[in-house]
Image (cartoon, rainbow, N blue to C red):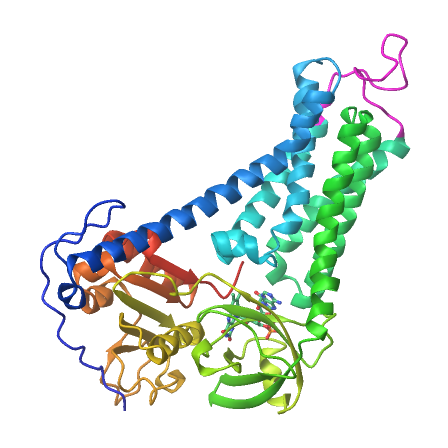
Amino acid sequence: MTQVKQRPPLPPLAGHYDHRCGAGAGPSVQTRLQRKPERALRKINAARCEYRQKKGMKQIFLGALYLVVVALPLAVSWIFGGGPRPWRQELATGLGMLAFAMILAEFVLSGRFKRISRGVGMDVTMRFHQIMARTALALALVHPFLYGGTPAGGPRPWDPTRILSVTTDFSILATGIAAFVLLPSLVALAIYRKYLDYTYETWRLIHGIGALLIAGLLLHHTIYAGRYSAEPQVMWLWIAMTAIAVGSLFYVYLIAPLRQLSRPWYVAAITRLSPKQWGLTIAPKGHGGMAYQAGQFVWLNVGHTPFTLHENPFSISSAPAVGPDLSFVIKELGDFTSSLDQITVGDRVYLDGPFGHVTVAGRSEPGIALIAGGVGIAPLIGILRQVRLTDDPRQLRLIYGNRRADQILFRDELADEDVTYVVSEPPADWHGHTGLIDGALLDDVFTPDQFRDWLFVLCGPPIMMDIVEAQLMVRGTPSDHILSEKFSYD
Ligand SMILES: Cc1cc2nc3c(=O)[nH]c(=O)nc-3n(C[C@H](O)[C@H](O)[C@H](O)COP(=O)(O)OP(=O)(O)OC[C@H]3O[C@@H](n4cnc5c(N)ncnc54)[C@H](O)[C@@H]3O)c2cc1C
């Protein structure tokens, strides 16, 4: 039975290492650093600052780009539109336009565009997608009611361009009314997806077709009922924005799969690792494989053509340094993951990826803390393997929690590593830590300096991640020293 491995004595701490960008490095905290001359420390500090600044800049750039995109129709309408109208009408139209622009932006916030998800992280991208969908819904629902009191009906002699009245022509309003009904249904179906009795793939199909339909309906409504769209500049802007949004969907479901066709993979090995966890290894067929960083994930499609909705995200558990083959640790959960026993060596596989920002490449923290719950070990073992295979000098420590002892994977491989095993339902002969990964355990394993200086990489059940993140915050770990991957976007 695996025992709690005694961690080697921590290096003596000396002085304080200054994290501030531009600050000279003071005396070091780690033995490794102590041995380095001050110049090396300054280099590490500079690299860390550069990394933070680059990441911060990217986030600011993406945030600003989003604001520009959703505000663009308002700005163009303001520049090219007619004279001012009563403020309520302007507000009603403005909210409607903002809602439509936000809905169109949702298409590229689907998580399938690496430039976006790599910049801010996949979790943040998906959360933003969800929050903005709800915000757009609120704006869209309010918008028609603000027209209350505006003259309605046919054209008036004093208002030949219908700038001061709203139309009651049903053929023009019908598309807006249809979108008004469909949009809440689409958002509600996404929020309550788990409670409904259909597969994830069916939901994805409904979500995609629904979004496409709503974009088309809103484009018609905006151009024919929207008064600012009478200006050609405004009308063409809406058409261009809708084309980009719809085009992004075609890219994901048509262009990207077409590219996958020329880069197939095949199943090289499939093994049961524990009662409910499998190890899958795939190899490239006729190409050199995929460039990725340890800890990233791909959308995996086994046994289908690339033009399918049957693809699932899985973290890569192998290390790039091993070679082109990719390995995965997969836990049985639903339709696909419970049918892994039907996969055979040689089966055709297609991949979309790599995605994800949970990687330690390019980071300059002196140590890496890996904290895994259950199958959350998948990306973390990949990181550990890469660190070892590349003789990376950073210190490494793993906390690995499971419900049962027979769920623990890679014991032999981890035998020489600094691992703290935790089991919440231990067998009678278990001598290690018991219970959950909590604040007390973290305090036991890490020193105050490690909390402050190390990089913490977490992957596991949401409750574990919440507890660990809360404790790290309490212990003063800077938020940009915490990387986490959630296995669910709900
Ligand atoms: C970034 C990321 C990395 C992951 N890495 C791993 C891993 O290394 N090992 C592992 O065992 N699991 C991992 N998962 C979880 C894994 O994707 C799901 O368990 C799997 O997709 C379930 O598919 P199913 O058909 O068996 O179950 P289903 O019953 O179809 O789905 C169960 C739940 O899994 C999620 N899911 C299913 N299909 C998709 C999809 N196409 N896209 C997004 N979510 C989906 C949904 O929340 C769904 O409700 C990861 C998830 C994410 C988001």
Residue drawn where x is 10% and y is 62% of the image: 13
Q: Which percent across, then down, holds residue 107?
A: 66, 50
Against 25, is 386 above or below?
below
Residue drawn where x is 63% and y is 59% of the image: 193
User: Start and end of the magenta stretch?
Assistant: 145-169
Q: Is residue 459 magenta?
A: no
Q: Main secondary structure of the magenta part?
A: loop
Which quarter shows the C terminus?
A: bottom right
Quarter of the image where ligand 1 sits: bottom right
- Could you tell whether 481 is left or right of 314 in the image? left
- Could you tell whether 401 is left or right of 267 in the image? left
Q: Which percent across, then down, holds residue 473?
A: 28, 52
Nearest the eye: 242 or 224: 242
Judge whether residue 32 can be spotted in this image. yes
Judge whether residue 142 can be spotted in this image. no
Task: Give the mark count.
Answer: 0
Nearest the eye: 130 or 235: 235
- The answer to which quarter of the image holds residue 76 is top right
